[in-house]
Image: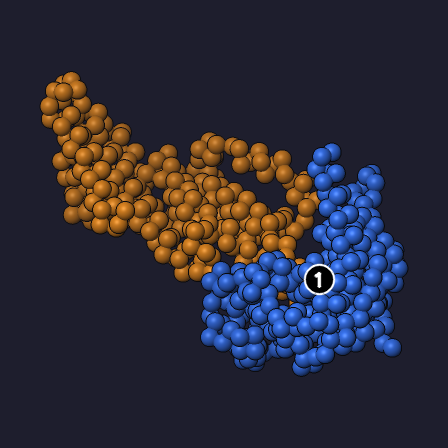
Amino acid sequence: MNRAVLTTLQVLVAVIAVLLWWVITQTAILGDPARIRFFFSTPADVFRQILAWFESGEIWRHLWITLVEAALAFVIGAVAAMIAGFWLARRPKLAAVFDPYVKAANALPRVVLAPIFTLWFGLGIWSKVALGFTLVFFIVFFNVYQGVKEVNRTVLQNARMLGMSERQLLRHVYLPSALSWVFSSLHVSIGFAVVGAVVGEYLGSAAGLGYLIAQAEGMFDIAGVFAGMFVLSAFVLLIDWGVTLVERKLLVWQPDDNH
Amino acid sequence: MQHAVRLDNVDISFGAAGKPLFRAVAGADLGVATGEFVAIVGPTGSGKSTLLNAAAGLLKPSAGTVEIQGRPLEGLNRKAGYLFQADALMPWKTARDNVAIALEIAGRPRREALERAEDWLGKVGLKGFGHRYPHMLSGGQRKRVAMAQVLIRDPEILLMDEPFGPLDAQTRLIMGDLLLDLWQQDRKAVMFVTHDLEEAIALADRVVIMSTGPEARLIGDFTIPLARPRDVSEIKLSAEFQELHRDIWHLLKEQVLKAYGNQNREERA
């Protein structure tokens, strides 16, 4: 399938979906359109709401806040996880001791932590960063841990025979190997950073996309909820696209079929 | 005579605690003189690589001694360069960086290391390929880079574990010639492990035969008097080569059949 056909088909899916949405909110095929409009709003109303946000410029502040929260959660979470992952992977006994606690902490649904973080860090951005942190940390942690453990044995032995010291092995073998695992999970971990930020905002805040959606919901403003969701999706897609660009730069050394 | 590598009554066993030991190599005696090219040939699973790893210091023998240039080996063999059978290049470094790193870790400045790496890539026939990552190179090209990486450090001893095993037949011949070419220039001591007897005779000064494992031993030691410099693909046609091959194959065949029989028994069991 060539690029033009693919793009056409992709756009077609959106057009059909919006068309169906429009039809059921305008006609009586699926029952009373007024009732359906109450639950699903209409494409035109949602579009008007998005337009209004961008026209007044108020959306930019919310996008910025969410972006900052997600970025901080990702950077702090990834750095902490890399240090912890490296440290434990190189100390199997310590890792064995901590294993059940790491698993237990990871099994905990993070949403229940949100009220505690609000209590600890207040209603500002830091409670959201903390929530994103707990999501990002474990993904990166497990990847680094795996990356260090599964360093190719021959590459490692070869590096040793070339005379590398432990520190040089860390820099030239373990770190690049672990980073390749981290990068391969970049989409997931950055996605989770955004999820953490938005969920945190949704549960209690004064700004951000999650706040916007929560506000609209509180006033039964369905158009506002849908508009918030669409902006959020576009926002995540944009970030994901950026990640792909970064990834292409950083992973040139990997064969194409790996990413 | 000073030996570059000397294995004396070496036993190598593997095993987990509580299980009977698997004795891979038993009572192996082998000396490699300075400047001598020794090939070790044996059937699959005869512990050839195990013996090589003992000389590299990657494995510790359970009995016997390993001496390098007259001194008992402690830890890794720092005098030796090791060419692995599998891909051993760092996939995240370009060919040039992979070669240069061997000098950089020894404390040479990066600029000098890169310059010399470029020279070495030329010597192994990869001029202009320095910017490529390993996955952009063919198997034979990767092996050339690995050779440059090992040789740029100018090790006094070369250990090679079926280095051309994964390559196709034509590439193996070419790599054999390249190896002899480079070796001819400064005659390092070489331990070359292979299961290919023709390759062993074509390359080496001496061919040593290992018996089928477990408890593999060295059961034959043949001097190869073929004149140097040699052309690996041409030399196989000479009568002298054929005669040597016949003699050694006679001994090796028995071991190969035994190894084959063992395998079949294991499969049936």
Q: What's the colour of chain A in the image? A: orange
Residue marked by disc 1: B197
At horizontal 27% and vertical 47% (from top left) the residue drawn is A1
Establish if B8 lies above or below A6. Answer: below
At label 1, the amino acid type is Leu
Residue A70 or B28: which is nearer the viewer?
B28
Residue A40 or B196: which is nearer the viewer?
B196
Q: State the image coordinates of residue A35 (x, y, percent, origin top left).
A: 17, 20
**Considering the numbered disc 1 on the image, is that residue within a helix, a strand or a loop?**
helix
On screen, residue B268 versus residue B138, left or right, reads right
Q: What's the colour of chain B in the image? A: blue
Q: How is the image coloured?
A: by chain
Q: State the image coordinates of residue B18 (x, y, percent, origin top left).
A: 82, 38
Residue B133 or B218: which is nearer the viewer?
B218
At horizontal 66% and vertical 69% (from top left) the residue drawn is B236
How many numbered marks does the figure carry? 1
For label 1, the crowd category at 10 Å Cα-Cα, with few meaning under 14, some 14 to 19 and many 20 or more, is some
